[in-house]
Amino acid sequence: MYFSRVLLDTSKRKTQVAIVSPNKIHGAVEEAFGERQSRNLWRIDKLRDKSYLLIVSAVKPDLSCIAAQFGFEGDCGESREYDRLLNRIEKGSKWHFRLTANPVHSLKREKERGKVVAHTTEKYQLEWLYRQAEKKGFCILPDAACVMESNWRIFTKRNTRQKVRILEVVFEGTLCVEDVDLFRDTLMSGIGREKAYGMGLLTIMRIGG
C-alpha cells in the first residue's frame, strides 16, 4: 500500500474549479494509475493553510500528471509505503483522526426501495459516524468527535449531463482501535459512499507521536 500527496496550487483557476468539482480530481487520480483499474481512496486536505491531494492506493501512482494540472511547476508530489503505519496499529492504541465522508440514510417507502438521502444536521452526522465505527474496528472516545465542515458539492458527471449533489462532511476526533485487522482494512478501503468523489478516506496520527 502507498500513501501519496500532491501540494495544490490554489492560485490556478483550474485547481480552484477542481476543488469544488470532485469529478475533475477523480479523473486525474484515475490517470495516475494508467490502465491499472482499481479503487483508490483520495481527498483534498488542508494543513497549515496549504491544500493537498491525498491518495491511498495498492500500487504506486504516477503523480506527474496531477502535479502538472493542479500543482506547482517542478513539484511531482511524493509517495511513501503505507504499510509502515499499518504495522504500528495495535489493539487499544489511540489516534487522532480526520475523515471526509458522505453520511447518508435510506428513507423507507412502502413496497419500494428506500431513497438514499444525506444527513444534513450535525447530530445525525455524528450518529452515523458512531455507527460506522462499530462496524469498522474502532470506537470513538466519549465527546471526542466533531463536525469541522459540511458542504454540498454540485457538479456534472463526466461524459453525461447528469447533475450530482454530494454532501461532504469533515469529521475530526480521537479513536481507539478495537479490532486491528478490521481497522487496517478500513484505512485501506475507506468508510461510506462516494469514494470516487473524494469521500471515505480516514487518516490517523498516533497520540504522543
Image (spheres, rainbow, N blue to C red):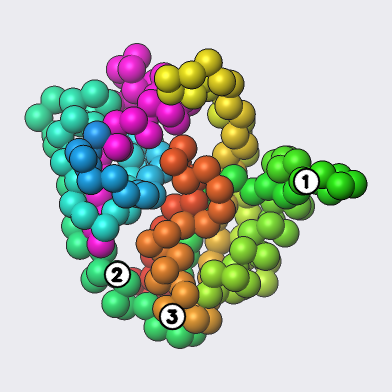
Q: Residue furthest bottom?
A: 91
In the rendered structure, the answer to whether residue 44 lies left or right of residue 172 reads left
- Residue 176 against residue 167 in the figure, above or below: below
In the rendered structure, the answer to whether residue 52 lies left or right of residue 121 reads left
User: Which disc is residue 114 wearing?
Assistant: 1
The residues tagged by marks 3 and 1 sit, at their Cα atoms, a distance apart of 33 Å
- Residue tagged 2: 85
Q: Nearer the viewer, mark 3 or mark 1?
A: 1
The residues tagged by marks 3 and 2 sit, at their Cα atoms, a distance apart of 12 Å
In the rendered structure, the answer to whether residue 57 lies left or right of residue 167 reads left
Instruction: Give the magenta-colored segment's residue range.
Output: 1-30
Regarding residue 93, the answer to whether it shows in the image is no
Residue drawn at (30%, 37%) of the image = 29
The residues tagged by marks 2 and 1 sit, at their Cα atoms, a distance apart of 39 Å
Callout 3 amino acid = Val
- Residue 138 against residue 66 in the figure, above or below: below
63 or 105: nearer the viewer: 105
* Magenta stretch encompasses residue 28: yes
Tell me, yes or no, whether the two marked residues, 3 and 1, touch with CB atoms within 8 Å.
no
- Residue tagged 3: 180
Quadrant of the frame with the N terminus? bottom left
- Considering only order in the chain, which callout, 2 or 3, is on the residue closer to the N terminus? 2
Residue 150 pos. (x, y %): 62, 39
Callout 2 amino acid = Leu
